[in-house]
Each structure stands twice: as structure tokens, then as C-alpha cells.
Image (cartoon, rainbow, N blue to C red):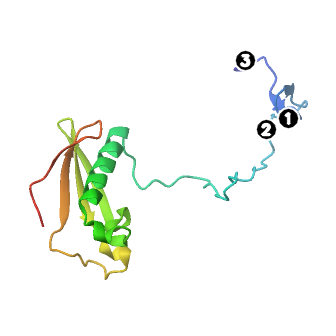
Amino acid sequence: MIPSPATPPVAPGPDAGIAAPAPPGSSGRDAGVIPPRPVAPGGIHWPEELRPLAVLDGPAVLAAHAALQQLLARLPRKHAGSCASSAKAYDVVVGEEGGLYFVRIDQRMDRCGWAPGITTEFDWFELYAVSPEGRVLERYPFSP
């Protein structure tokens, strides 16, 4: 219920389910008490404010995921489980044009302990065309 100007402010009652009128002269606010951040049973401390790395629409997330999964599936199985064969070793760049998403995946071996800027090949990247539903339509015909 949205209070009208004639309705006095309400403060939560002791049972946290029934609202009671606020004491006369109070605004019904909590006087600045900041509740502690919730901690999940697993011990996760939730942030006060989320600092996003990027904001993507849902189809862009599906496109990025599909392209990254396709790349990881193409890597040699003998390296499975290594950092270089994990998502940690890649940056994903997503663009949209003409109703399709174009996903470029850049190698980042510095995240695996290699010297910054070192790649296994020159100008290494993968480029994919992906539908808004997350279906990889085609891989760019470039093989480093």
C-alpha cells in the first residue's frame, strides 16, 4: 500500500511482518542504522555495490558463451585442465551488427604466468558470427 499524505508514517513492528504507526514526531526511518551485509552459508561476503566489468544484453552474453565454448572445444585435449586451455587465458569482445553478434576472442597468456604480451602465435584471435539465440553460425576463416 502506498501511503497517502494523510496517512502517518509506519515503522516496522517487532514481528517484522506487521506495520505499526511510527512514534509521534519521528519520520519512521531507522535513524541511520546500517544493517550488516548478508553472508551466505558458504561464507560469501556480498559487495555493498556491484562494480560491473561490462553491461551486456542477454543475447550478447549467450553469444560470448557460445563462441568461447566452441573455442575451448577446439583446443587439443592433451592440454585440457591447463591454464592455457581455460577461459582464464582469453578476453572476449562482443559487438552487434545487422542482428548478429560478432565475438572476437583474444589470447591472454599473461594470465597464465607468461610474460605480458606473449602469445603463442602472432596476431592470434578467433572471430565468430553468432545468432541472438547463442548459436555459432560461422567461424571467421582465419587460422593463426
46 in relation to 19, above or below: below
Q: 40 above or below 83?
A: above
- Image depth: mark 2 or mark 1 in front: 2
Asked if the residues shown at circle 2 and circle 1 are in contact, with their CB atoms under 8 angstroms apart, the answer is yes
Q: Which mark is on residue 8?
A: none
Which residue occupies the foreground of this view, 45 or 136?
136
SS for dot 2: loop
The residue nearer to you, when weighing 80 against 71, is 80
Q: Nearer the viewer, residue 24 or 100?
A: 100
Work out whether mark 2 precedes mark 3 in sequence or the reverse, and give the earlier one.
3
Horizontal and vertical percent position of residue 67:
27, 51
Seen at 75% across and 49% down, the residue is 35
Image quarter in which the C terminus is found: bottom left
Query: Which label number is shown at residue 4?
Result: 3
Mark 1 closeness class: few <14, some 14–19, many ≥20 residues within 10 Å: few
Q: Quadrant of the N terminus?
A: top right
Q: Which residue is mark 1?
A: 26
Q: Amino acid at mark 3?
A: Ser
In this rendering, position of residue 142 left or right of residue 52: left
* Distance from the alpha carbon under mark 1 to that under mark 3: 17 Å
Residue 92 figure quarter: bottom left
In the rendered image, the residue lying farthest to the front is 78
Q: Quadrant of residue 80?
A: bottom left
Q: Amino acid at mark 1?
A: Ser
State which tag comes first along the sequence, 1 or 3.
Answer: 3
Which residue corresponds to the image point at 29% horizontal and 36% vertical from the top-left? 133
- Kind of residue indicated by mark 2: Arg
- Residue denoted by label 2: 29
Tell me if 108 is positioned left or right of 139 in this view. right
Contact? badges 2 and 3 (CB < 8 Å) = no
